[in-house]
Image (spheres, grey):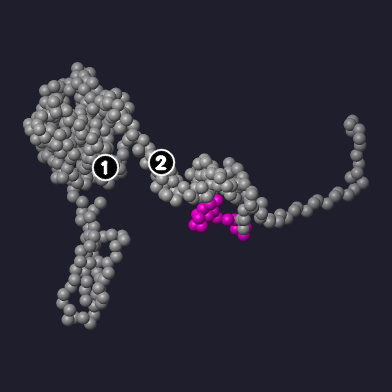
Amino acid sequence: MADVAELIETAPVAGQEDQQDQEMALATTNTSAEVAAPTGMKVIKKIVRKKKRPARAQVDPDFITSEPPPQTGVTYNLWYNKWSGGDREDKYLSQTKAKGRCNIARDSGYTRADQVSGSYFCIAFARGICSKGQDCQYLHRLPGTFDLFNPNVDCFGRDKFSDYRDDMGGVGSFMRQNRTVYVGRIHVTDDIEEVVARHFAEWGQIERTRVLNTRGVGFITYTNEANAQFAKEAMAHQSLDHDEVLNVRWATADPNPMAQAREVRRIEEQAAEAIRRALPADFIAEIEGKDPESRKRRKIESSYGLEGYEAPDEVHFARGSNAVNPLGRDGFEVEYQERAMIENGDFNEVPGQTEQDTGGIFSGSTLAALNKAKIAVASKPKAAASAGPLVAYDSDSDDE
């Protein structure tokens, strides 16, 4: 969102030409803030909008050359322009340093993809070799919390598979939400943990970092899965503070029981947060014990006039203004939510009368109002009886 500033100029009113100084103030726009104008001064507001920065081209277009991919399999697929039949990459290429590196503070900006909802992120931008800049059809920024994609694709729009590759590289699997990347070939130093955390924190919020100093490997868990996908491509074949070439892969499932319990607890917290947004605030405050007076109100409201009785949750929250189900709050709306009554008909609910089944076309309140409405229907006049000598002719015989 563009930064918006509000420039307030104060000018003298008519009859005060002797005053030469003009007061100026710069204030950030705020919906709740009020600017008090000096007495006898005229306030002129000017809104200054700062435009977003366009994305920068990371490399020159001539730097990108169309070369056939290295042979990593036994069969070359012309349609996908890659080798197939092999699950592992070339060992030489895995130790070759990347051609570029993304700098978020310098390279990020708006592109054509910002005008299209649901756009994917640019994988060339993550690798630091995008030459299109603001003309790119993909996003040139870091994934955020609200960037949600189909579980079958990653943040770059590539299709996932049902299982991981043998070397845990590639796009990944849609069978498990993986937020942890494995980093190998790290140059071991005394401050290795600080170095790894500093370099990988550029690509999103980190939940947990674990580095094995003796083996030179690390595991970085991000809060968002899209940030882990972006970091895997951004740090592949890169180096930290030394001249090493990192081996970045997807991490396998942690067999540690503590890690599994931590993942289960995270999923439960996400489900609890979704439930908090769906249920009424009073109900949530009472369950979580945040409202000290809720227990007292509960005893009074759920007793229903019976001393020592307290209705269970399924009864107390079934009907009335505190009902969890919206159908249970039917009839307890506030004034601006009341249903419209039938014209020239007053709807007064009879005490003790239960609402009829709402499975039909009309609701119970509509049927009650129709029953009370006095509608006079004019009856059709009866036809005059026919007269004649053969009118009363009849016979009891079946043969006639």
Q: Which residue matches tag 1? A: 144
Q: Is residue 27 above or below residue 283?
A: below
Q: Quadrant of residue 23 in the image?
A: bottom left
Which residue is the extreme one toward the left?
Answer: 243
Q: Which residues are magenta?
A: 331-345
Image coordinates of residue 24 in percent, x first then y, are 19, 68
Nearest the camera: 11 or 61?
A: 11
- Residue shown at 22% from the left, 45% from the top: 111
Per the model, the C-alpha gap separating discs 2 and 1 is: 23 Å
Q: Residue at x 62, y 53 (%)?
A: 349
Residue that mark 2 sits on: 275
Q: Could you say which disc has been placed on residue 22 in the image?
A: none
Closer-to-camera residue (69/23): 23
Give whichever of discs 2 and 1 has the lower sequence position.
1
What kind of secondary structure does the magenta stretch mostly adopt?
Answer: loop
- Mark 2 or 1: in front is 2
Res. 169 visible in picture: yes
Residue 147 screen position, x and y as percent: 29, 41
Tell me the quarter of the picture where residue 231 sits: top left
Q: Which percent across, then down, holds residue 152?
A: 32, 31
Task: Classify residue 286 as left or right of residue 108.
Answer: right
Horizontal placement of 150 versus 110: left or right?
Answer: right
| Relative side of 62 to 340, left or right | left
Q: Quadrant of the C terminus?
A: top right
Looking at the image, the residue that sits furthest to the top is: 74
90 part of magenta stretch: no
Vertical relation: 388 (above or below) 255 = below
